[in-house]
Amino acid sequence: MSTPFELAGRVAVVTGASAGIGEHSARRLAARGMHLVLGARRLDRLTALAEELSSAHDVRCQPVALDVTSSGSVQAFGDAADGFAGDAGVHLLVNNAGLARGVARIPTATLEDEAGWAEMLEVNVMGLLRVTRRFVGGMVERGGGHVIHMGSLAGIETYEGGSVYCATKASVRVISKALRLELLGSGVRVCCINPGLVETEFARVRLGTQEASDKVYEGMTPLTGDEVARAVEWVAGLPSFMNIEELDLQPVDQASAQKVHRVPRS
Ligand SMILES: NC(=O)c1ccc[n+]([C@@H]2O[C@H](COP(=O)([O-])OP(=O)(O)OC[C@H]3O[C@@H](n4cnc5c(N)ncnc54)[C@H](OP(=O)(O)O)[C@@H]3O)[C@@H](O)[C@H]2O)c1
């Protein structure tokens, strides 16, 4: 029987760790004994999470403010993570920070919607690239490491009002595939995880209100951040000769991007 990959004692970097999937990934990886560098813009949340996880699991956790839209911020984040990891270096990157802004359709979109499109492209595509570029070189030098990108079902299927978000997540999948080819022979693994509906802060950020967000999940059972984190943990813990290239997961109640089974409220 092959041996699972030993995560304990290694260093993981998680972006978008202040909420949702990223926060839960940090929780699961800390429970496996990984030391963590946590990045997002809301440093207060990261600090509270780092304190909680380091005392609960006897691991080291470093919260670091990160805005993936800024090259300088990503550079400083990378320097802080490298300093934290020391000679062993960062083993695992969970490149998860991302967002959707609005549901504008192209024919009726406004200038304000255009700003939301730019933000999605900047965070989900350029931000992801900046962070991966910053860490992957060190992994190659060390002859191993693991990059997990957070894609989406929206990167596989499109829907009205989702053109740009879908485009960003299709980009994440394509970037992951190209990176995998570029890293062949380096020992560095690359995975793109593509969840369907997950109840996090995501829909509130996208739609602007809690009420609108609640409607997204009405009458159905969505995934939770912890279930996606379970997938992150599983992928990360597989034997080092095995690469999960893409992992698609949806709620049972969701069979495609817009085909959702809902039970009407009685
Ligand atoms: N929820 C879903 O249905 C779903 C489905 C498929 C894929 N996804 C993907 O999963 C990932 C995580 O989303 P989530 O559902 O966990 O949403 P979430 O609860 O809103 O969390 C998003 C995270 O991204 C961070 N972030 C946003 N902009 C950032 C920036 N400029 N710099 C650094 N961090 C930034 C946020 O932190 P700060 O605001 O503190 O910076 C937050 O920690 C995203 O890539 C999303 O596209 C979500």
Image: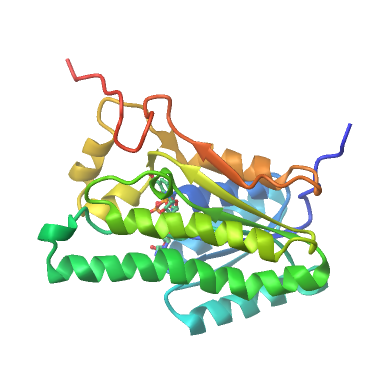
Answer left or right for 143 relative to 135.
right
Q: Residue at position x 63%, y 63% from top?
A: 179
How many marks on residues? 0
Position in image of residue 10 (x %, y %): 76, 58
Q: Is residue 163 above or below residue 122?
A: above
Position in image of residue 129 (x %, y %): 52, 70
Mark yes or no: residue 99 visible.
no
Q: Residue at position x 30%, y 28% from top?
A: 260
Answer left or right for 28 relative to 33.
left
Position in image of residue 131 (x %, y %): 56, 70
Q: Is residue 136 above or below residue 169?
A: below
Q: Is residue 15 above or below residue 229?
A: below
Q: Residue at position x 31%, y 26% from top?
A: 220
The answer to which quarter of the image holds residue 32 is top right
Answer left or right for 123 relative to 57.
left
Q: Residue at position x 82%, y 66% from top?
A: 143
Where's the N terminus, which quadrant? top right
Give the farthest residue toward the top: 266
Quadrant of ligand 1: it is bottom left
Mark yes or no: residue 150 visible.
yes
